[in-house]
Image (tube, rainbow, N blue to C red):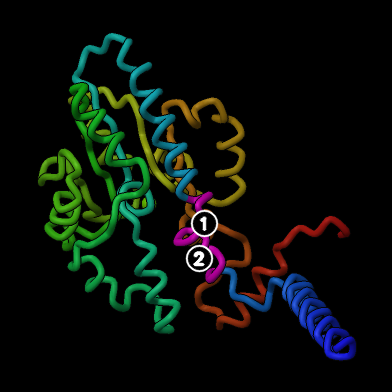
Amino acid sequence: MKFKYLILVMSLSIGLLSCSVSRESARQQPLQMVSPDLYATLYQQYAAEYKALCFQAYNLASLRLEQALTENYSKPTAIVLDIDETVLDNIPYQAAAIKGGFGYPVQWAEWMESANAEPLAGVTEFLQLAANTGVNIFYVSNRKEVFKEATIRNLQAKGLPFADEAHVLLRVSGNEKESRRKSISAEYEIIMLVGDNLGDFDRMFETDADVRMTATLEYAGQFGKKWIVLPNAVYGSWLETMPGYDTKLTKEALTDSLRMQLKGFNE
Ligand SMILES: [Mg+2]
């Protein structure tokens, strides 16, 4: 009986030990064993922190909107929002691309035409507040014009206001958004801009990484005020303008090229 008890205690201890060892070795796995775009994509699909950041952005946007509406304007007021990773969640496309081993634009048209993207956390309440307080809403997105009908259908299906031909301004020629913002400004006072890419706020950010960073430091006071930023670690100008980022490289060469850009404490 005593011997049986000893065996039981020993096997339990070995079990617990191996469990803690495997947890420890999992912790020591080098991060580069997993592709960085996998982490970024999982973060936006699984991290409660990502949802919390979206709520934070839109809670702040509501507060700033109410403050902005205490001012007098000579023109009707408007807010301008980007669509992808600002209003609608496109990460299911990215997830399918990683799992299927393909990249943009493969299956992008299918994703657009499905008109099935979900609104980001907090955006629906914010847009309803804006609409209810008499603010006009414009969606300025670099989705191609060919997807305009599907985009409007998607926004309408999710109950988002101002989802119509006149308020959804997609990309007709270049990626720049300034000309579309200017055409809105001709008739409306833009009191807020919301986006996940700094180019959603001002043309000065549509440039190289150093200038983007310098301008961000210079205009620090605008963020969380007139400019509301949503997080997006999966894609965007931050990545496209990064030194070492070159899509013509093979996956391995691109990984090496980007790894060279890391700024270690011991260099
Ligand atoms: Mg976007």
Residue 236 or residue 30, whichever sits in front: 30
What's the amino acid at mark 1? Ala
Horizontal side of 180 relative to 243 (left or right) equals left
What's the amino acid at mark 2? Leu
Q: Quadrant of the N terminus?
A: bottom right
What residue would you read off at disc 2? 42
Find the magenta span and give its range.
Answer: 37-50
**Residue 233 highlighted magenta (yes or no):** no
Determine the CA span between mark 2 and mark 1.
7 Å
Q: Secondary structure at mark 2?
A: helix
Residue 241 or residue 125, whichever sits in front: 125
Residue farthest toward the front in the current orientation of the protein: 1
On the image, the x and y values in percent for residue 96 come to 37, 76
Q: Is residue 144 above or below residue 199?
A: below
What residue would you read off at disc 1? 47
Q: Are marks 2 and 1 in contact (CB under 8 Å)?
A: yes
